Amino acid sequence: MDVETNRQRAMERRDFGYYEARNRGCYRDVKSKDITSCKGNASILQRLRASLQVLDISDHHVYNHFVVGEGDDLGWLGYFIGKSKYLYDLRITSWGEGENIEAFIEGINRNQSINSLHIGTDLRGVSFRNLRPFFRNNNNLYQLEFNFEVGLECAESIAFVLDENRCQSLESLRFEDCNLGEDGFAVIATALRTYPELEELHLQHNNIGLMGCTALADTLRGWEASNLKHLDLDGNGIDDQGLQTLAAGITNTKLEELHLQHNNIGLMGCTALADTLRGWEASNLKHLDLDGNSIDDQGLQVLAAGVTNTKLEELYLSDNLITGAGLRSMSDYFQSESCCLKTLNVLRNDFGDEGAVALADILMGNKSLTSLHFISHQSGITNPGWAAFSKLLCDPSSIKSTYHSNHIITTIGEYDMPRTPLNIRRYLELNEYPHPAIHKILKSHPDLDMEPFFQWKLKLLPVVINWFENCRSSMLASSGMMHANYPQEESTQRQNLQSRELSALYKFVRGMPALTVISYWQQQVINIQARRRRLDVEEETAWVRLGGRPRDEGNVEFIQIGTKRMRQE
């Protein structure tokens, strides 16, 4: 069979060889405007032939989006994708009116530069198994994402390709809103048993149920050296039994983020998770999302006991059944020196002022939490609750109480704090300044009482002077932030600081004369008492030499005899 016959048959089949033949061995000779339906597609195709790195095939006319219309042959697009050495991100969300999908798939199979592939639409009757060469030949693919309704047959094809053509470079796998169901995900999970190198597994909204949890747990337990750090199971109908099954597998991972929001987790599920975390010595979990479940006060109490010695930094508990009693049960956790939590979300929990007071109490002395998120009107917080938060941030009852207030947290309420009272927002802003305690003391105590420091006398005077030096340094360091928000307050504080320093020093020194007089007479008493003790000793010695103590015996003649003896001696 001659070369011309082969070329003609390739053109009839419209496979990769067809486009190669049309291109006469040099794909740069084909004009993009002649093989596309619009100027935008022609421009994208031209850049793809050069060095285009990101390509979206969709139905949105925006930058870098190839919108397939009448006159667009997907075979040409696939051909140039296969030729590209620069394309690293390919996203397919719509085929439009395109044809020759099989030729397009064949072009993808020849590409070795793509490292991220997103498929957001079905393959128009073409089996996913046709992509086997792509997974077999591409050693750069690290992210694979599906975002369309995947039926059981398609799930089986995907599982077959993953199992038969193990892609060792794959680090992130996403099935988002695919509605895989229990059976569909079970076959996917089974295929993943040879992928311990996966670092991220996103399975949002797939209704995997108990069967899916069992299959996933079996896969996780079977990984000898798992790299999994991120597991997202949002909206999968997971109940207590499902979480109990799944919890047994997560300890075999390096999990840092666990997303379990919008499921049906209650007390028993919290108990299983808490037991797992408590016994997981190598836990690296930093992010736990339990929004939108059925966790009540008892469940929160159990969970808090389980996370006490973990490295958890973010905890999401919004849309649950938590009240003030449940929040107060977290006291031991927040007061623990091992507490690392930085963010707590309790949005849409009706805990009222009781919960606000509980949160303020348990955060007193906490050194880690920086963000506390809730929606005040949905949580039932009124003036008493806000007053508790105000006292948490700055207790003006004494300088010592102000110093021991919370200077760590920077957000209380919603993310941009539109409903948080102004005085609390200003305290929170002060917490972002260098040495926030200094700013709060200056703000809350205009007249600094020096009398409590008199007991240390002049020894403490250098400390007082140094404290005011720190005040000036702190005010200078925070001048940019303060000037931007409250320029008049900055000017007032600068003017008042020097006069307050002089006033404090005057009070301190003025107290010295009285202290000096008191100290003088105290020392005189001490000296007299010491002299009296010495005289007593001398007197005792004298009487011993005289041979007795007449005062005790009442014998005056004894003194005369003793005196006569001393003269004779």
Image (cartoon, rainbow, N blue to C red):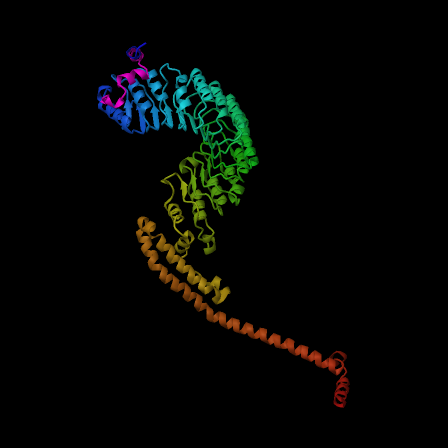
Q: Per the image, is 27 magenta?
A: yes
| Numbered label tally | 0
Q: Splitting the image into 4 quarters, where does residue 500 fall? A: bottom left
Residue 519 seen in the current view: yes
Q: Per the image, is 384 magenta?
A: no
- Relative to 144, residue 381 above or below: below
Magenta residues (range) = 7-32
Please name whichever residue, 25 or 146, is drawn nearer the observer in this view of the structure: 25
Magenta part mainly helix, strand or loop?
helix
- Relative to 149, residue 492 above or below: below
Horizontally, residue 6 falls left or right of residue 404, namely left
Q: Quadrant of the C terminus?
A: bottom right
Residue 96 seen in the current view: no
Please name whichever residue, 555 or 280, is drawn nearer the observer in this view of the structure: 280
Residue farthest to the front?
2
Q: Quadrant of the N terminus?
A: top left
Residue 348 image point, x, y percent: 43, 34
- Relative to 511, residue 550 above or below: below
- Relative to 180, residue 529 above or below: below
Horizontally, residue 15 falls left or right of residue 201, namely left
Residue 55 image point, x, y percent: 31, 26
Residue 307 image point, x, y percent: 53, 37
Residue farthest to the bottom?
568
Residue 343 image point, x, y percent: 44, 39
Please name whichever residue, 303 or 427, is drawn nearer the observer in this view of the structure: 303
